[in-house]
Image (tube, rainbow, N blue to C red):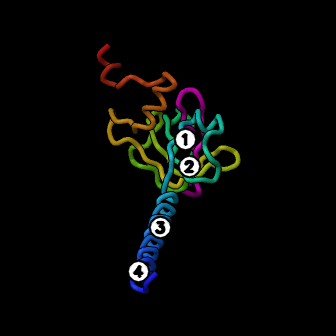
Amino acid sequence: MNPKRKRRLLIVLFLVFGVCVAVGLTLYALSQNINLFYSPSQIAKGEAPKETRIRAGGMVVDGSVKRDTQSLDVTFAITDYEHTTLVKYSGILPDLFREGQGIVAQGELDANNVLQASEVLAKHDENYMPPEVAEALKATGNMPKPEAEVFNK
């Protein structure tokens, strides 16, 4: 092989190696930011990974919100009307957070299947429900009727 071809081959191999490294680093960075949605039923069945960042959602169980008087710690339960999952959160809850409404909490499951939430998201009006929560409730057959339908009947 002449020196000119050898140099071109080395340049091509170097470029291919560089592209492979760049793609690998990009995929690694993206995998760190993936957080999948799990319903309380999936969490109860053990389908959700422990100590991995996930999103869980459902309806806040009436009477389950317990606030610590000395700190911003809040404990509440979410349900898809089949199973219930306990959520612990330390921080200020969204203004629209209330019992009986759909929420999505982002955090990690501990060894006791309690979601240690780092973020809690609440719906932004009375007709909206996060798509993941709506799908989970439809799957269990417990999708609540919109308030407009309830009042019209």
Q: Residue furthest front?
A: 1
| Tag 4–tag 3 contact (CB < 8 Å) | no
Badge 3 marks a residue whose secondary structure is helix
Spot occupied by residue 49 in the image (x, y as percentages of width and height): 62, 47
Looking at the image, residue 47 lies above or below residue 153: below
Q: Amino acid at mark 4?
A: Arg
Q: CA distance from mark 1 to mark 3?
A: 50 Å
Q: Earlier in the sequence, mark 1 or mark 3?
A: 3
Badge 2 marks a residue whose secondary structure is strand
Badge 4 marks a residue whose secondary structure is helix
Q: Amino acid at mark 3?
A: Cys
Q: CA distance from mark 1 to mark 2?
A: 7 Å
Residue that appears at 61% across and 39% down: 43
| Residue 74: mark in rendering | 2
Q: CA distance from mark 3 to mark 2?
A: 46 Å
Q: Nearer the viewer, mark 3 or mark 2?
A: 3
Spot occupied by residue 1 in the image (x, y as percentages of width and height): 46, 81
Q: Is residue 98 magenta?
A: no
Q: Earlier in the sequence, mark 1 or mark 2?
A: 1
| Residue 20: mark in rendering | 3
Q: Where is mark 4, residue-wise?
A: 5
Tell how many labels.
Answer: 4
Q: Is residue 105 left or right of residue 86?
A: left
